[in-house]
Image (tube, rainbow, N blue to C red):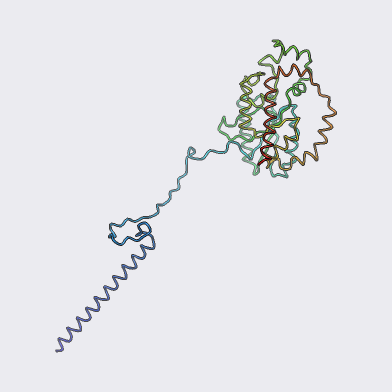
Amino acid sequence: MRRHFINTFALIVLCVVFLLSGFVVINKKSVVNNNKKGHGEEYVGNYVSSTKSSASRKKFTTPRKKHVTKSLNELPPMDHLNAHALFLNTIPKSGAEVLVLLLKWLQGRNSFKHVKLKKENNNKLTIIQQENLIYEVEDTLRNEAIPVSFDKEVRFVNFSLIGKQSPTFFTLIRNPEELITARYPNLTDDYIKNCSTNDPGCLFNSNDNGIELNIPYFCGYSPRCDSLNDDWALAVAKENVEKYYPVVGVLDEIYSTITCLELKLHYFFRGATMMYKKKLLGFNKKKKTSKNTKKGDYKHLKKILRAEIAFYEWIKFRLFKDINNKRLF
């Protein structure tokens, strides 16, 4: 009897142990499944898969992002013009001194620095001189912590020829009929009249005439840029203006020029129109009325300066078109 009681008690203990071990296993599986479910590893779409075995279930995990440095070819192109660098390539006897004065007065107020670059003996730079100018501008921009404006009496220099970003060019031109009499005051009316008849002895009718008006300062350094009435030079000058010069002003519309500069190059020329009215407007009026400019024979000059006049009228039209468009928007 006693032996039977012991066997029965042992059987009950074994049953209890078996039940407890099964309960522990079930709880452990539940915890594992909950952990996997929390990490999103057992989800198929928006639902948990319960029909497939754990071996056949597809686990969806977010792939790790690789951070790889892009090559230069993969990088986006830099802006065509550097908005933090202005370059005023001045043309002699065209009134650009007004713009230089404004830049000097505005630099502190508008948080930029103006740099006057050294004048060369000849504004037709050699290849080496052009490269030196590009590197000088680049070094100055690198050393300064603020935007910079430059001025230099020089023809347009294409910075992209050596893979550098171009500054934003701008300048001021003058009516070619007035400019030629200002630059070359010793030209007589008879001389100009003879030139209009294609006299081979006339400087205007020579490709190497040494006469520089407006077009060469935008065309560049090709020998054809120096030829008067060369349609190729005129086309290149216009192309460079459209590509590199947001503003080209005209001297006889100086106030409109400054207005356009303040509209399109606002960071540098903010407050320029007001400053011009206060400090320069009266001075320029007195200077204009007191100076007796020799005009020469404009009738014959129009024929001699056909391309120059066409370029000047195009620049003037572009100036007022830009002013009207900016004011509309």
The residue at the point 15 percent across, 89 percent down is 2
Along the line of sight, the residue nearer the viewer: 186 or 181: 181
Looking at the image, which residue is at 83% across and 30% down? 287
Is residue 211 placed above or below 132 in the rendered structure? Answer: above
Q: Quadrant of the N terminus?
A: bottom left
Q: To which quarter of the image does residue 302 belong? A: top right
Q: Position of residue 99 (x, y in %)?
A: 73, 35
Where's residue 12, x and y in %? 21, 81
Tell which residue pokes out farthest to the bottom in this image: 1
Q: Residue at x 75, y 32 (%)?
A: 253
Which image quadrant is residue 216 in? top right
Residue drawn at (28%, 58%) of the image: 55
Please state which of residues 202 and 10 is positioned toward the viewer in this rendering. 202
Residue 179: give x, y in percent of width and height: 75, 24
Viewer-nearest residue: 181 or 124: 181
Kindly indicate the quadrant of the structure image that contains residue 162: top right
